[in-house]
């Protein structure tokens, strides 16, 4: 005889499993598009994040986010250590260069989180931005299916990543960047394609396989907003 409690638990587990099953396709409707040009020629990551803030109803401005909230180091402050290695500023924590010029380089997820959380604090919000590294593709699409846009670290036009340059931080971490590194927002997917809200080209579809390859080449890094 089957225990009714065990049977109930089994059904509950099955229902939860079914609820987690990803739809074959999904797109976040009415997502606001913001173009980084001409004011922020290298400010793709902060512009992408500004789109997400606007999606959640905040009146964030891309220029204000880039010039007042984004932690910026105008020089990488590179030097050769006693061990012969090249050291410099942490790309993960700062935007290196000036996002308002073509001489800007890049920033990592931590810099964006710092900017957004300061903005949210000043606006009395309980939401928070969180950074993820090494996130699974399934989780990425799950967020989208739950109407959570994801700022993804990728490349311009989703092309293969160019040759990288890099250095070590004071903590011994190796950081790198490439000339075609980019930040955009994943807002949809189907069996063969993804839909990207791009700060340069607007809403565009890419082959899913190519996107996943590029996303992996950038360390499966992303930022989302959570309540």
Image (spheres, helix red, strand yellow):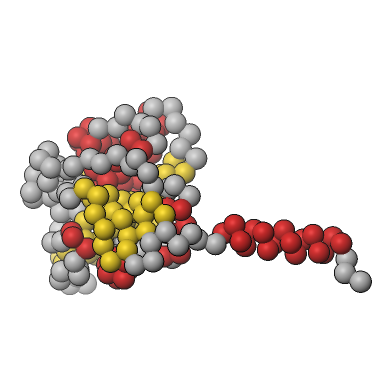
User: Which residue is at the front of the view, 70 or 23?
Assistant: 23
Image position, residue 7 (x, y; %): 81, 64
Q: Is residue 73 above or below residue 168?
A: above
Quadrant of the rendered image containing residue 221: bottom left
Can I make out residue 92 in this image? no
In depth, the one of 108 and 33 nearer the eye is: 33
Q: Residue at x 19, y 66 (%)?
A: 159
From this viewpoint, which residue is outermost toward the left?
102
Instruction: Tell me the residue at 50%/40% (across/down).
Output: 227
Q: Is residue 138 left or right of residue 160?
A: right
In the picture shown, does residue 64 fall above or below 175? above
The N terminus lies in which quarter of the figure? bottom right
- Identify which residue is drawn at 54% across, 62% down: 21
Closest to the observer: 117 or 183? 183
Q: Which residue is drawn at the image coordinates 25% and 50% (left, top)?
A: 203
Residue 152 percent location from the top left of the image:
32, 55
Q: Quadrant of residue 49?
A: top left
Place of residue 160 in the rendered image (x, y in percent of width and height, measured from the top left): 20, 70
Q: Number of marks in the image?
A: 0
Q: Is residue 209 visible?
A: yes
In this view of the protein, which residue sits in the foreground, 64 or 86? 64
**Residue 125 location in percent, x, y?**
44, 31
């Amino acid at each position: 005889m089957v225990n009714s409690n065990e049977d109930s638990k089994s059904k509950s587990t099955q229902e939860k499993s079914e609820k987690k099953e990803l739809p074959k396709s999904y797109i976040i409707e009415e997502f606001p598009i913001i173009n980084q040009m001409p004011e922020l020629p290298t400010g793709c990551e902060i512009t992408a994040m500004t789109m997400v803030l606007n999606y959640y109803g905040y009146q964030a401005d891309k220029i204000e986010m880039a010039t007042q909230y984004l932690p910026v180091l105008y020089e990488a402050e590179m030097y050769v250590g006693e061990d012969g290695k090249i050291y410099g500023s942490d790309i993960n924590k700062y935007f290196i260069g000036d996002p308002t010029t073509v001489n800007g380089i890049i920033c990592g997820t931590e810099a964006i989180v710092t900017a957004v959380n300061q903005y949210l604090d000043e606006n009395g919000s309980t939401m928070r931005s969180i950074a993820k590294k090494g996130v699974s593709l399934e989780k990425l699409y799950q967020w989208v299916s739950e109407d959570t846009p994801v700022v993804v670290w990728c490349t311009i036009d989703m092309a293969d990543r160019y040759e990288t340059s890099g250095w070590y931080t004071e903590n011994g971490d190796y950081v790198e960047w490439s000339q075609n590194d980019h930040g955009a927002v994943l807002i949809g997917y189907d069996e063969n394609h993804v839909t990207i809200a791009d700060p340069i080209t607007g809403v565009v579809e890419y082959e899913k396989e190519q996107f996943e390859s590029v996303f992996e080449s950038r360390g499966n890094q992303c930022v989302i907003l959570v309540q």
